[in-house]
Image: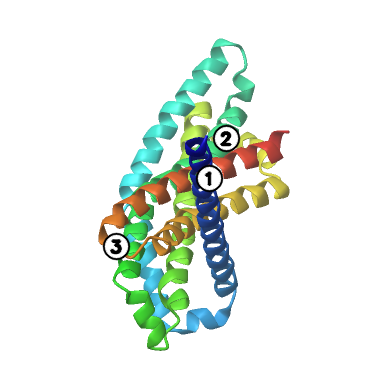
Amino acid sequence: MIRNMATSESIIAALGCTAVQRWRTFQVTGRLAGRAVVEALSPRFYGNSATRSVVAKQIYFTAWQILPAFTLFAAMLSFVLIEIVVSTARDFGLSEYALEMTVRVLVIEIIPLLTALFVATRSGAAINTEVALMHIHNELEGLRQAGIDAMRFELVPRVIGGAVSVLALTAISSSVALVIALLLVYGPQPWAWAEFGQVLARIFTPLSVIGLWLKVLLFGVVVTVIPIASGLQVPRKLFFAPIAVLQGMVRLFFVLMLVEVGSLALRYI
Protein backbone atom coordinates (compact mmCIF):
# COMPACT_ATOMS: atom_id res chain seq x y z
CA MET A 1 0.00 0.00 0.00
CA ILE A 2 2.75 2.41 0.99
CA ARG A 3 4.71 1.45 -2.12
CA ASN A 4 1.69 2.13 -4.33
CA MET A 5 1.18 5.53 -2.70
CA ALA A 6 4.86 6.39 -3.23
CA THR A 7 4.59 5.33 -6.87
CA SER A 8 1.48 7.44 -7.37
CA GLU A 9 3.15 10.44 -5.78
CA SER A 10 6.22 10.07 -8.00
CA ILE A 11 4.03 9.83 -11.10
CA ILE A 12 2.09 12.94 -10.09
CA ALA A 13 5.32 14.78 -9.34
CA ALA A 14 6.77 13.79 -12.72
CA LEU A 15 3.61 14.93 -14.52
CA GLY A 16 3.72 18.21 -12.61
CA CYS A 17 7.36 18.80 -13.55
CA THR A 18 6.59 18.03 -17.19
CA ALA A 19 3.63 20.42 -17.20
CA VAL A 20 5.72 23.19 -15.63
CA GLN A 21 8.53 22.65 -18.13
CA ARG A 22 6.13 22.74 -21.07
CA TRP A 23 4.51 25.89 -19.72
CA ARG A 24 7.90 27.58 -19.45
CA THR A 25 8.78 26.50 -22.98
CA PHE A 26 5.45 27.88 -24.19
CA GLN A 27 6.16 31.18 -22.42
CA VAL A 28 9.65 31.48 -23.93
CA THR A 29 8.33 30.61 -27.39
CA GLY A 30 5.46 33.09 -27.17
CA ARG A 31 7.70 35.85 -25.84
CA LEU A 32 10.26 35.31 -28.61
CA ALA A 33 7.61 35.16 -31.34
CA GLY A 34 5.92 38.32 -30.07
CA ARG A 35 9.24 40.15 -29.81
CA ALA A 36 10.17 39.08 -33.34
CA VAL A 37 6.90 40.41 -34.76
CA VAL A 38 7.27 43.74 -32.94
CA GLU A 39 10.90 44.18 -33.98
CA ALA A 40 10.22 43.17 -37.58
CA LEU A 41 7.60 45.92 -37.87
CA SER A 42 9.85 48.54 -36.26
CA PRO A 43 12.00 50.64 -38.65
CA ARG A 44 14.51 51.22 -35.83
CA PHE A 45 15.36 47.53 -35.79
CA TYR A 46 16.91 47.75 -39.26
CA GLY A 47 18.91 50.86 -38.43
CA ASN A 48 21.57 48.83 -36.64
CA SER A 49 24.26 47.26 -38.83
CA ALA A 50 24.75 44.34 -36.42
CA THR A 51 21.13 43.21 -36.67
CA ARG A 52 21.11 43.67 -40.44
CA SER A 53 24.24 41.55 -40.66
CA VAL A 54 22.70 38.69 -38.67
CA VAL A 55 19.50 38.83 -40.76
CA ALA A 56 21.51 38.83 -44.00
CA LYS A 57 23.66 35.90 -42.87
CA GLN A 58 20.59 33.93 -41.87
CA ILE A 59 18.98 34.52 -45.27
CA TYR A 60 22.24 33.63 -47.03
CA PHE A 61 22.77 30.33 -45.22
CA THR A 62 19.08 29.37 -45.11
CA ALA A 63 17.87 30.38 -48.57
CA TRP A 64 20.56 31.63 -50.93
CA GLN A 65 22.99 28.72 -50.52
CA ILE A 66 20.35 26.11 -51.24
CA LEU A 67 18.37 28.07 -53.84
CA PRO A 68 19.65 26.23 -56.98
CA ALA A 69 19.35 22.75 -55.48
CA PHE A 70 15.99 23.43 -53.86
CA THR A 71 14.58 24.99 -57.05
CA LEU A 72 15.69 21.97 -59.06
CA PHE A 73 14.19 19.61 -56.51
CA ALA A 74 10.90 21.56 -56.46
CA ALA A 75 10.80 21.53 -60.27
CA MET A 76 11.34 17.75 -60.44
CA LEU A 77 8.74 17.09 -57.75
CA SER A 78 6.28 19.44 -59.41
CA PHE A 79 6.79 17.76 -62.78
CA VAL A 80 6.12 14.30 -61.35
CA LEU A 81 3.07 15.30 -59.31
CA ILE A 82 1.56 17.42 -62.08
CA GLU A 83 2.03 14.61 -64.60
CA ILE A 84 0.30 12.17 -62.23
CA VAL A 85 -2.65 14.50 -61.62
CA VAL A 86 -3.03 15.41 -65.31
CA SER A 87 -2.84 11.78 -66.47
CA THR A 88 -5.33 10.67 -63.82
CA ALA A 89 -7.73 13.49 -64.68
CA ARG A 90 -7.58 12.57 -68.39
CA ASP A 91 -8.25 8.89 -67.64
CA PHE A 92 -11.40 9.83 -65.76
CA GLY A 93 -12.54 12.47 -68.26
CA LEU A 94 -11.79 15.37 -65.94
CA SER A 95 -9.16 17.15 -68.00
CA GLU A 96 -10.82 20.54 -67.54
CA TYR A 97 -10.21 20.28 -63.79
CA ALA A 98 -6.59 19.08 -64.02
CA LEU A 99 -4.96 22.49 -63.73
CA GLU A 100 -7.15 23.67 -60.87
CA MET A 101 -6.61 20.44 -58.95
CA THR A 102 -2.86 20.71 -59.48
CA VAL A 103 -2.61 24.29 -58.29
CA ARG A 104 -4.81 23.74 -55.24
CA VAL A 105 -2.93 20.65 -54.09
CA LEU A 106 0.63 21.48 -55.14
CA VAL A 107 1.00 25.24 -54.87
CA ILE A 108 -1.31 25.94 -51.95
CA GLU A 109 -0.65 22.89 -49.77
CA ILE A 110 2.37 20.77 -50.69
CA ILE A 111 5.02 23.32 -51.65
CA PRO A 112 4.65 25.62 -48.58
CA LEU A 113 4.77 22.66 -46.20
CA LEU A 114 7.64 21.04 -48.10
CA THR A 115 9.61 24.29 -48.00
CA ALA A 116 9.07 24.66 -44.27
CA LEU A 117 10.15 21.06 -43.65
CA PHE A 118 13.22 21.53 -45.85
CA VAL A 119 14.28 24.69 -44.01
CA ALA A 120 13.51 23.11 -40.65
CA THR A 121 15.67 20.08 -41.43
CA ARG A 122 18.56 22.11 -42.79
CA SER A 123 18.55 25.24 -40.62
CA GLY A 124 16.28 24.50 -37.66
CA ALA A 125 18.61 21.91 -36.18
CA ALA A 126 21.63 24.16 -36.77
CA ILE A 127 19.95 27.11 -35.05
CA ASN A 128 18.86 24.90 -32.18
CA THR A 129 22.41 23.61 -31.68
CA GLU A 130 23.94 27.08 -31.96
CA VAL A 131 21.60 28.65 -29.43
CA ALA A 132 21.90 25.67 -27.07
CA LEU A 133 25.70 25.96 -27.07
CA MET A 134 25.53 29.72 -26.57
CA HIS A 135 23.21 29.14 -23.61
CA ILE A 136 25.36 26.37 -22.12
CA HIS A 137 28.55 28.45 -22.43
CA ASN A 138 26.81 31.50 -20.89
CA GLU A 139 27.46 33.59 -23.99
CA LEU A 140 23.97 35.08 -23.94
CA GLU A 141 24.29 35.92 -20.26
CA GLY A 142 27.63 37.55 -21.00
CA LEU A 143 25.97 39.76 -23.58
CA ARG A 144 23.30 40.77 -21.07
CA GLN A 145 25.92 41.65 -18.47
CA ALA A 146 27.70 43.77 -21.09
CA GLY A 147 24.49 45.73 -21.64
CA ILE A 148 23.70 44.11 -25.00
CA ASP A 149 20.17 42.93 -25.68
CA ALA A 150 20.82 39.34 -26.79
CA MET A 151 17.21 38.90 -27.81
CA ARG A 152 17.39 41.81 -30.24
CA PHE A 153 20.89 41.36 -31.62
CA GLU A 154 21.25 37.56 -31.68
CA LEU A 155 17.88 35.80 -31.58
CA VAL A 156 15.24 37.99 -33.24
CA PRO A 157 17.36 38.54 -36.41
CA ARG A 158 17.51 34.77 -36.85
CA VAL A 159 13.72 34.55 -36.64
CA ILE A 160 13.28 37.32 -39.21
CA GLY A 161 15.91 35.82 -41.52
CA GLY A 162 14.31 32.40 -41.30
CA ALA A 163 10.83 33.77 -42.01
CA VAL A 164 12.07 35.73 -45.03
CA SER A 165 13.87 32.63 -46.31
CA VAL A 166 10.76 30.47 -46.13
CA LEU A 167 8.69 33.17 -47.86
CA ALA A 168 11.27 33.59 -50.64
CA LEU A 169 11.80 29.87 -51.27
CA THR A 170 8.04 29.26 -51.30
CA ALA A 171 7.45 32.08 -53.79
CA ILE A 172 10.19 30.87 -56.14
CA SER A 173 9.25 27.18 -56.04
CA SER A 174 5.54 28.02 -56.44
CA SER A 175 6.30 30.13 -59.51
CA VAL A 176 8.32 27.29 -61.01
CA ALA A 177 5.47 24.87 -60.32
CA LEU A 178 2.95 27.16 -62.02
CA VAL A 179 5.11 27.43 -65.14
CA ILE A 180 5.52 23.65 -65.30
CA ALA A 181 1.77 23.19 -64.81
CA LEU A 182 1.04 25.58 -67.67
CA LEU A 183 3.41 23.74 -70.01
CA LEU A 184 2.21 20.25 -69.09
CA VAL A 185 -1.50 21.04 -69.23
CA TYR A 186 -1.64 23.35 -72.25
CA GLY A 187 1.74 23.04 -73.91
CA PRO A 188 3.50 26.05 -75.51
CA GLN A 189 0.26 27.53 -76.87
CA PRO A 190 -0.17 31.34 -76.85
CA TRP A 191 -3.92 31.08 -76.32
CA ALA A 192 -3.36 29.14 -73.11
CA TRP A 193 -2.32 32.22 -71.14
CA ALA A 194 -5.85 33.65 -71.07
CA GLU A 195 -7.42 30.43 -69.79
CA PHE A 196 -4.52 29.92 -67.39
CA GLY A 197 -5.10 33.40 -65.97
CA GLN A 198 -8.80 32.69 -65.52
CA VAL A 199 -8.07 29.53 -63.56
CA LEU A 200 -5.56 31.34 -61.33
CA ALA A 201 -8.02 34.19 -60.74
CA ARG A 202 -10.65 31.67 -59.67
CA ILE A 203 -8.25 29.98 -57.25
CA PHE A 204 -6.28 32.90 -55.88
CA THR A 205 -8.96 35.18 -54.55
CA PRO A 206 -7.76 38.02 -52.29
CA LEU A 207 -8.84 36.11 -49.19
CA SER A 208 -7.13 32.93 -50.42
CA VAL A 209 -3.88 34.76 -51.13
CA ILE A 210 -3.89 36.42 -47.70
CA GLY A 211 -4.53 33.07 -46.02
CA LEU A 212 -1.78 31.36 -48.01
CA TRP A 213 0.91 33.91 -47.18
CA LEU A 214 -0.14 34.10 -43.55
CA LYS A 215 0.33 30.35 -43.37
CA VAL A 216 3.74 30.59 -45.06
CA LEU A 217 4.76 33.41 -42.73
CA LEU A 218 3.68 31.34 -39.74
CA PHE A 219 5.73 28.44 -41.09
CA GLY A 220 8.74 30.75 -41.35
CA VAL A 221 8.38 31.96 -37.78
CA VAL A 222 7.84 28.46 -36.41
CA VAL A 223 10.95 26.93 -38.04
CA THR A 224 13.18 29.37 -36.14
CA VAL A 225 11.28 30.29 -32.96
CA ILE A 226 10.83 26.72 -31.72
CA PRO A 227 14.49 25.69 -32.20
CA ILE A 228 15.64 28.89 -30.45
CA ALA A 229 13.21 28.36 -27.56
CA SER A 230 14.35 24.75 -27.23
CA GLY A 231 17.98 25.87 -27.13
CA LEU A 232 17.25 28.42 -24.42
CA GLN A 233 15.59 25.80 -22.22
CA VAL A 234 18.46 23.30 -22.22
CA PRO A 235 20.22 22.69 -18.86
CA ARG A 236 23.74 24.11 -18.72
CA LYS A 237 25.40 20.76 -19.36
CA LEU A 238 27.10 20.06 -22.68
CA PHE A 239 25.71 16.54 -23.05
CA PHE A 240 22.15 17.94 -22.95
CA ALA A 241 22.67 19.80 -26.26
CA PRO A 242 21.87 16.82 -28.56
CA ILE A 243 18.80 16.02 -26.45
CA ALA A 244 17.58 19.61 -26.77
CA VAL A 245 18.05 19.50 -30.54
CA LEU A 246 16.09 16.24 -30.82
CA GLN A 247 13.27 17.53 -28.63
CA GLY A 248 13.18 20.82 -30.50
CA MET A 249 12.94 19.15 -33.90
CA VAL A 250 10.17 16.80 -32.77
CA ARG A 251 8.25 19.75 -31.36
CA LEU A 252 8.90 21.73 -34.55
CA PHE A 253 7.54 19.04 -36.87
CA PHE A 254 4.49 18.61 -34.64
CA VAL A 255 3.69 22.33 -34.71
CA LEU A 256 4.18 22.48 -38.50
CA MET A 257 1.63 19.70 -38.89
CA LEU A 258 -0.77 21.51 -36.56
CA VAL A 259 -0.48 24.68 -38.64
CA GLU A 260 -1.12 22.75 -41.86
CA VAL A 261 -4.11 20.89 -40.39
CA GLY A 262 -5.51 24.14 -39.02
CA SER A 263 -5.11 25.76 -42.44
CA LEU A 264 -6.92 22.89 -44.14
CA ALA A 265 -9.72 23.04 -41.59
CA LEU A 266 -10.23 26.77 -42.08
CA ARG A 267 -10.13 26.43 -45.85
CA TYR A 268 -12.31 23.41 -46.49
CA ILE A 269 -14.49 22.81 -43.42
Three-letter amino acid code at disc 2? Val
Left/right placement of residue 71 relative to residue 22 reads left
Residue in the foreground of this view, choosing between 194 and 126:
126
Q: Is residue 72 left or right of residue 4?
A: left
- Relative to residue 230, is residue 145 depicted above or below? below
Q: Which residue of the protein is positioned furthest toward the front in this rendering? A: 2
Few, some or many residues within 10 Å of mark 3 (<14, 14–19, 20+):
few
Q: How is the image coloured?
A: rainbow
Is disc 2 placed on a helix, strand or loop? helix
Residue 191 visible to an observer of this rendering:
no
- Where's the C terminus, which quadrant? top right
Viewer-nearest of labels 1 and 2? Answer: 1
Residue 121: x and y in percent read: 36, 47
Secondary element at tag 1: helix
Quarter location, residue 190: top right
Q: Which residue is mark 1?
A: 9
Disc 1 crowd, CA 10 A, few/some/many (<14, 14-19, 20+)? few
Q: Position of residue 142 (x, y in %)?
A: 34, 81
Q: Given the image, on which type of amino acid does mark 1 rest?
A: Glu
Q: Please give the label number shown on residue 189.
A: none
Q: How many angstroms separate mark 2 from mark 3 (CA)?
A: 48 Å
Q: Report the residue marked by disc 3.
A: 237
Q: Is residue 91 left or right of residue 73?
A: right
Residue at 36%, 62% in the rendered image? 235
Q: Is residue 107 above or below residue 47?
A: above
Q: How many angstroms separate mark 3 from mark 1 (CA)?
A: 28 Å
